[in-house]
C-alpha cells in the first residue's frame, strides 16, 4: 500500500510555501479554516513585513489584520501571530522549538500544526491527522479509532518513522483527489486492492 501511494504521488510534499521553521509555523496556523493555496497568496507580503519572531511580537495588529483579511478570521489569526511572536521571544530565544509540548504551548498551535512543523521544517517523524487522513485511515482499515491522537498512534505503528511525514502528505493528496468524502472514485483508486471499504 505504501509503495502504491509512493508511485502515485512521488512528489508529495507540504503545499504551504515557506523557507524557514517560523514561516511554516505561521503558514500552518493561518491555514486553519482556509486552503493552503489562499494562505500562499498572502504569505509573501506577510513574510516580507515580518521576517522574525520579534517582528511578530512588535507587529501592528491592524496591519496584520489587513494582510490576513483574505483568509477570514483575521482578528483571531492576528492575535495568534502576535502571541506566537511574544512567546517565541520570551521563552524560546526567538526560535521555533522542535518539541510537541513546546510547540503546542504557542497560541493557535494544536497537535496537528505541531506535527506539520516538526515533520516539514525539522524532519522529525509523526503522522499528521487531518480530515483526509482520518477518513482514509478508517476506510483502509488502518485504524478503528475516532480521535486524532489514537488515529495518529495506530497509523504510526504501521509506517516507518522516516516515511511518516510524506505518508501523511500522500494520504492527504489521495483524499483530496480520489478518496473523497462523498462519492470516492474507487474504480480509479490505486489502493483498491487493500481497501476493505471499496464500493
Image (cartoon, rainbow, N blue to C red):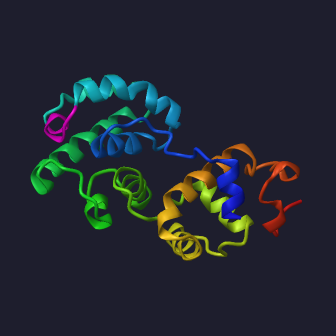
Q: Nearer the viewer, residue 171 or 7?
A: 7
Q: Is residue 127 visible?
A: no
| Figure quadrant of the C terminus | bottom right
Locate residue 122 relative to residue 95 in the image: left or right. right
Locate residue 115 relative to residue 48 in the image: left or right. right
What residue is at 57 percent from the left and 75 percent from the top?
Answer: 154
Examine the image and state in which quarter residue 106 appears: bottom left
Work out whether 75 lies above or below 130: above
Q: Position of residue 44 (x, y in %)?
A: 35, 25
Q: Nearer the viewer, residue 57 or 2?
A: 2
What residue is at 40 percent from the left and 26 percent from the top?
Answer: 42
For the stretch drawn in magenta, the main secondary structure is: helix
Locate residue 89 relative to residue 71 in the image: left or right. left
Q: Position of residue 125 (x, y in %)?
A: 43, 65
Work out whether 152 lies above or below 191: below
Q: Position of residue 78 (x, y in %)?
A: 29, 36
Work out whether 159 lies above or below 76: below
Work out whether 87 lies above or below 151: above
Q: Position of residue 85 (x, y in %)?
A: 19, 43
What residue is at 33 percent from the left and 46 percent from the top?
Answer: 25
Is 9 one of the magenta-colored residues? no
| Figure quadrant of the N terminus | bottom right
For the magenta stretch, what is the residue range?
51-57
Q: Is residue 21 visible?
A: yes
Is 52 one of the magenta-colored residues? yes
What residue is at 57 percent from the left and 70 percent from the top?
Answer: 159
Tally of marks: 0
Amino acid at each position: 500500500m505504501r509503495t502504491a501511494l509512493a508511485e502515485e504521488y512521488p512528489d508529495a510534499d507540504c503545499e504551504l510555501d515557506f523557507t524557514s521553521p517560523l514561516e511554516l509555523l505561521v503558514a500552518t496556523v493561518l491555514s486553519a479554516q482556509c486552503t493552503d493555496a489562499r494562505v500562499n497568496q498572502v504569505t509573501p507580503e506577510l513574510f516580507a513585513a515580518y521576517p522574525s519572531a520579534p517582528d511578530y511580537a512588535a507587529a501592528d495588529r491592524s496591519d496584520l489584520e489587513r494582510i490576513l483579511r483574505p483568509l477570514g478570521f483575521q482578528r483571531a489569526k492576528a492575535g495568534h501571530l502576535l502571541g506566537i511572536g511574544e512567546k517565541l521571544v520570551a521563552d524560546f530565544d526567538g526560535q521555533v522549538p522542535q518539541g510537541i509540548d513546546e510547540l503546542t504551548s504557542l497560541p493557535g498551535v494544536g497537535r496537528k500544526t505541531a506535527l506539520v512543523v516538526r515533520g516539514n521544517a525539522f524532519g522529525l517523524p509523526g503522522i499528521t491527522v487531518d480530515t483526509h487522513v482520518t477518513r482514509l485511515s478508517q476506510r483502509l482499515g488502518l485504524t478503528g479509532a475516532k480521535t486524532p491522537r489514537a488515529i495518529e498512534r495506530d497509523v504510526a505503528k504501521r509506517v516507518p518513522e522516516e516515511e511518516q511525514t510524506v505518508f501523511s502528505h500522500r494520504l492527504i493528496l489521495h483524499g483530496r483527489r480520489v478518496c473523497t468524502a462523498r462519492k470516492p472514485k474507487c474504480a480509479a483508486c490505486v489502493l483498491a486492492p487493500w481497501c476493505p471499504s471499496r464500493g
